Amino acid sequence: AYVGVRGGYVIVTADDPECYSSQNEQDNRYYALLSGLPCLEPSNAQEAKDMTVSAIEISEKLELPVLLRTTTRVSHTRGPVIFGKLAEPNLKGSFVRDVKRQVMVPAHSRRQHSVLLRKFELAKEISENSPYNKIVHERKNGEYALISSSSAYNYTVEAANLLKLDAGILKLGMTHPLPERMIGKFLKKHSKVIVVEELEPYLETQIKAIAKDYAPNVEVYGKLGKPYFPREGEFSTQMVAAGMARIAGKKVPISFGRIEEKYAEVVKGLPARPPILCAGCPHRASFHVIRKIAGESAIYSTDIGCYALGIAPPLNVGDMLICMGASIGVAEGIGKVTSTHALAIIGDSTFFHAGIPGLINAVYNNHKIVVAVLDNLTTAMTGHQPHPGTGLTGMERSVEKVSIEKVAEGCGVNFVKVVNPFNIKEAEAVLKKALRFDGPSVIVFRAPCTLMVVKERRRKGAELLACRINEKCTGCMACIKVLGCPALIVEEEKVSINEALCNACGLCISICPYKAIECAKIR
């Protein structure tokens, strides 16, 4: 923020109320507050596009980064979007030497702090005139008013309509800096203001401060004091309506409880559908080897990626999961103070992103840990994006592959091995040696993501294979108990294989003690 930018710079920051796929529910609006940067919050697909364009324009005008804060619900929204004209991108730049602005020694930092504060005053005026901050429904002298932003705005409007609450509605799309004058004038017209926002009382805290100067007698309801809305979880129309009804002394006209009871009755017979590794996933083979050789007494520090699903039974590989790249450092700490084996489970893209400093620390302090790099040759969990080990850039330009094993050797690791996790015996033998090694060791379990393999087979028109159960099956359930593969199905106390899911990885063949599973061509 002190240095600023010379071209448009937009940072998309995605919050996750309800922790659908995150390890926390942090409210990233506070990054804007902390840094003195503008923040925009879309509530639908059209606004997401429009605000991105506006964010770039604001960034270029102020020479500051701009945060575009979305939530899971907004990010998953689908709807018609009207596009504007596309400008020709200027991909060539030139370096402007400005030591006082760009070299952050104390003398320059003090000056740039003043520059940032002046830019922030300009940002306030932009917010006051922003089309994204607007009074959606105005009442000149109404009792109630509603202020909301982001996805919570949609629930707010629905809840107000449901309760037939005739209230003024202020929608905030640029939430930092807030349009103080606009909010102040809006507050003066009402005696009771309900602030609806997901996660922290970010808006409510600032609106109460504004009310002190503009409308000291107005009552502000939200999360602070007597909480009418929670500070955790994702909101819904039901939740918002319940809170607003308590404030306004109204009754919710719909029995959501009866709807939930009916829903529970309908779904109670359905099987659970937890997240699970795909059929044929090489990580399942890696986890089988790791669990079999390292055993239950070992402590497994895992990381962010598909392999985080290894924490679930029957694989049960994962005792600690903090944040991306933490697995190696956590394993080092555990291994330092315990007498048991400590293993770090980390993926290929996570290794490149944040695993290397931890590995260097393991070498420097000679930590006796095993780092298992589960290399499926892609960033699978988020959609098969490339990484330095794939040989492709984000723009699909072919480049030199960065070798994980060579990086590990370059960091000073003396025990580095690469194995195919589906070659069970070799992988087991290598892991046994790694566990005995006096110092940090790295094993790269390398096999491509099965989704990529199947896609490539189909592209080439190659034979598609699947495993099948033969007459030797005794129903011992060893394959079910050990692997938990979704292609394995129990029917009438016997195991069968769903050929539509099976990718013929062959792992179940190696597990079956009766040789009752074989591979066959299906199409």
Image (tube, rainbow, N blue to C red):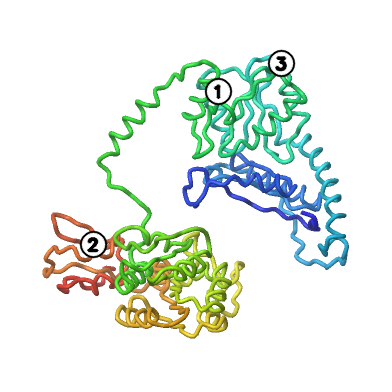
Q: Amino acid at mark 2?
A: Lys
Crowd band around label 1 with a 10 angstrom C-alpha radius: few (<14), some (14–19), many (20+): some
Q: What's the distance in space between the residues labelled 1 and 3, CA to CA? A: 18 Å
Q: Identify the amino acid type marked 3.
A: Lys
For residue 309, what is the image quadrant? bottom left
Q: CA distance from mark 2 to mark 3?
A: 67 Å
Q: Any mark on residue 481, and which? A: 2
- The spot of residue 219 in percent (x, y) is 65, 21
Is 421 left, or right, of 56 in this rendering? left
Residue 379 is left or right of residue 124, and the answer is: left
- Do tag 1 and tag 3 residues touch (Cβ < 8 Å)? no
Image: 72 above or below 387: above
Residue linked to disc 1: 160
Q: Quadrant of residue 166?
A: top right
Task: Please identify the quadrant where the N terminus is shown.
Answer: bottom right
Residues at circles 2 and 3 in contact by the CB criterion of under 8 Å: no
User: Within the image, what quadrant is residue 134 found in?
Assistant: top right
Q: Nearer the viewer, residue 489 or 217?
A: 217
- Give residue 140's mark: 3
Residue 423 left/right relative to 171: left
SS category of the residue bearing label 3:
loop
Question: Which is in the foreground here, disc 2 or disc 1?
Answer: 2
Is label 2 in a helix, a strand or a loop? helix
Residue 117 in the image: x percent, y percent? 83, 46
Number of residue marks: 3
* Residue at the spot 72% in from the left edge and 23% down from the top edge: 186
The reply to whether the C-beta atoms of the residues labelled 2 and 1 are less than 8 Å apart is no
Amino acid residing under circle 1: Ala
**Of circles 2 and 3, which is in front?**
2
